Amino acid sequence: MPYTIRNANGEITALLRDPAIGAEEFLPQAHPEIEAFLSNCSREDPKLALADSDKDIARITEDLIHLLTAKNLILFTELPTAVQQKLLNRERLRSSLQGAIDNFLDEDESI
């Protein structure tokens, strides 16, 4: 995903997971036109807008929990076990991603 369908003005009107007649153009999901199309869809559909904001709220909540535990206002162990596991898993994923980025940036490649 996403293969695009465009109108006569060249604007994206639909995204498809697989190529189809009229949707042979593939753009990466991070392409500015794809992001703009999805952003417009989110504003038009409250459910999509709410789902989109969930990502931001999840990160805010994660940062808030980290801040509260760092200031010893709450103990990490006071959180429900499922919450602890999810937070630890996200921290591991973020650390591994950061490690991969650091390794990529630290490689000394000669031309």
Image (cartoon, rainbow, N blue to C red):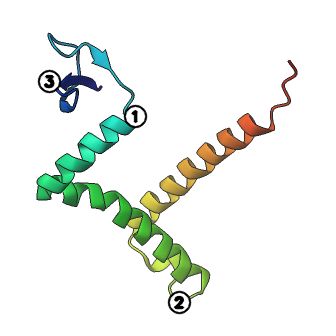
Which residue is pictured at 62% across the width and 51% down the height? 95
Tell me the SS state at disc 2: loop
Q: In which quarter of the image is the N terminus?
A: top left
Pick out the residue farthest to the front: 9
Which residue is pictured at 43% across the width and 63% down the height? 59
As shown in the figure, which amino acid type bears the numbered disc 2? Answer: Leu
Q: In this view, does 45 lie to the left or right of 27?
A: left
Please tell me in which quadrant of the rendered image residue 14 appears. top left
Name the residue beneath numbered marker 3. Answer: 8
Spot occupied by residue 37 in the image (x, y as percentages of width and height)? 25, 41
Of labels 1 and 3, earlier in sequence is 3
Spot occupied by residue 75 in the image (x, y as percentages of width and height)? 52, 82
Q: Tell us which disc is closer to us: 1 or 3.
A: 3
Name the residue beneath numbered marker 2. Answer: 73
Which residue is pictured at 21% across the width and 48% down the height? 40
Tell me the SS state at disc 3: loop
Q: Residues within 10 Å of mark 1 (few under 14, many from 20)?
A: few
